[in-house]
Amino acid sequence: VYRVPPVVYELHLRGLRPTPSTLASGRGRQVVKRHVRRLGLDIIMVIESCLVSVLVICFVVEFFDLLTDLAHVTSLLEVRDAARLRLRRSLDKLWLILLLFTYFDIYHKIMTSLAYCLLVPVLHISNAALAARRTTTKAQS
């Protein structure tokens, strides 16, 4: 609906009246095709803005910054650009999250190996003591 006034205005600039027969003519059809393409680009831009915004919401860190940016935008292009910027910044910080997971994994493996280093010798000493006790009780009986 918001594309109808620009179509009528462009038809008037070309000296055409907005009637069905004019829209079916060659010059009128060109005007309509151009505006249909622009409408398609607008729809694609809305879909892209929504998808990028959803991705930014998944990375909670930049979501609130995006909300403050959206308070000052006036067009769909600015919404898309703000969402892309926040997504790019979120993806730049993604390596920090992956690095944290890597550090946690390394920390977990170091702690596990330290626990085994402490417990395995004690376990073998206790097993040796039990085996020695069994052999002495068998020898006495």
Image (cartoon, rainbow, N blue to C red):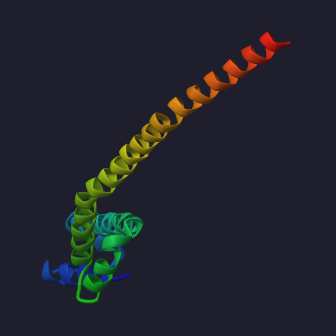
Query: Looking at the picture, how far across and down is residue 95, in whole percent?
Result: 27, 53
- Reply above or below: 51 against 77: above
For residue 124, side relative to residue 33 (left or right):
right
- Reply above or below: 16 against 131: below
For residue 31, side relative to residue 67 (left or right):
left
Query: Looking at the picture, how far across and down is residue 16, in whole percent?
Result: 20, 79
- Reply above or below: 98 against 68: above
Residue 3 appears in view: no
Q: Nearer the viewer, residue 37 or 59?
A: 59
Q: Nearer the viewer, residue 95 or 22?
A: 95
Residue drawn where x is 34% and y is 75% of the image = 63
Most extreme residue toward the bottom is 71
Q: Nearer the viewer, residue 41 or 104?
A: 104
The N terminus appears in which quarter of the rendering? bottom left
Residue drawn where x is 35% and y is 67% of the image = 56
- Reply above or below: 113 against 53: above
